[in-house]
Every structure is written in structure tokens, then in C-alpha cells.
Image: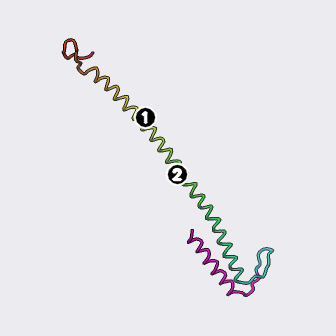
Amino acid sequence: MKSYILAITVTMFLSALFAFQNIGDVTVKFLIFEKIFPQGVWEVFVFSAGAAIMWVFSIFSIVEVKNNQKDKIKKVEEKVTNLENENKKLLETIVLLKSATGAENASSEPTVDENTNTNTMAE
């Protein structure tokens, strides 16, 4: 921010110096407008108007870039959400497969009959 203020200050100083050194009168005609200004004042005015117009256009450019970035962020967030949902479904499928496999393993694992102390297969 300090460099921006410094740049404006230097530009204002140079513009004032330019206007002071170019004090000859110039007739300015535009459409129905006609006025006599000192040359330096006129040129500083035109430069300032051009800078202001470019500043306005740069604001439109910044808004356009921000909107594009918002669109990209929205697409990425949607993709992340879809991937999270897919991950959740895959994890649920893995849990179901493990529980189904665990049930099969549990039925085929030998069990110890406490009364006879012998191993038997569960049916």
C-alpha cells in the first residue's frame, strides 16, 4: 500500500511540474465543448482521465477473473463431493464384504466343544 501511495505522490508531483513548465494556452474543442486551457493543465487532465478510465476497466477485469475462479472452485468442490461419496460407498462395500466373508469364516472355523473337549466344525 505504501508503494502505491508513493507512486501516486510522485506522479502528482511530476504532473504539477509538467503543468507549470507548459503554461501556453491551448484551445480545446470537443463536440459542442470549446474551452481555452493552459497546455500543461490540459495534458494532465487528459492523462488523469485516461488513468481513471483504465482503472475502471481493470476493475471489470478483476471481477471477471474472480468469477472464473469461483466457477473453477465450484467445479472442484463438486468433484471432491462426488469423490467423497464414491469413497463412502466403496468403504461400505468393503465393510459388507468383510462381514459376509467373516460370517463364512466363522461358520467354517473349528469350535471347541466344552463338554467333550474335542474340535468340531460348525454347520
**In the figure, is residue 30 to the left or right of 110?**
right
Is residue 112 positioned above or below 64 on the image?
above
Q: Secondary structure at mark 2?
A: helix
Locate residue 108: give its quadrant.
top left
Q: Which residue is mark 2?
A: 72
Q: Position of residue 52 (x, y in %)?
A: 66, 69
Task: Give amino acid for label 2.
Answer: Lys
Specify which label sits upstream in the sequence, 2 or 1: 2
Q: Tag 1's secondary structure?
A: helix
Q: Are marks 2 and 1 in contact (CB under 8 Å)?
A: no
Q: Is residue 114 magenta?
A: no
Which residue corresponds to the image point at 62% horizontal and 62% vertical from the top-left?
A: 59
* Side of 91 relative to 71 (left or right): left
**Residue beneath label 1, please?**
89
CA–CA distance in space, label 2 to label 1: 26 Å
- x 51%, y 47%: residue: 75
Q: Position of residue 47 (x, y in %)?
A: 66, 76
Residue 39 location in percent, x, y? 71, 84
Part of the protein shown in magenta: 1-27
Look at 69% across and 86% down and name the residue there: 22
Q: Quadrant of the C terminus?
A: top left
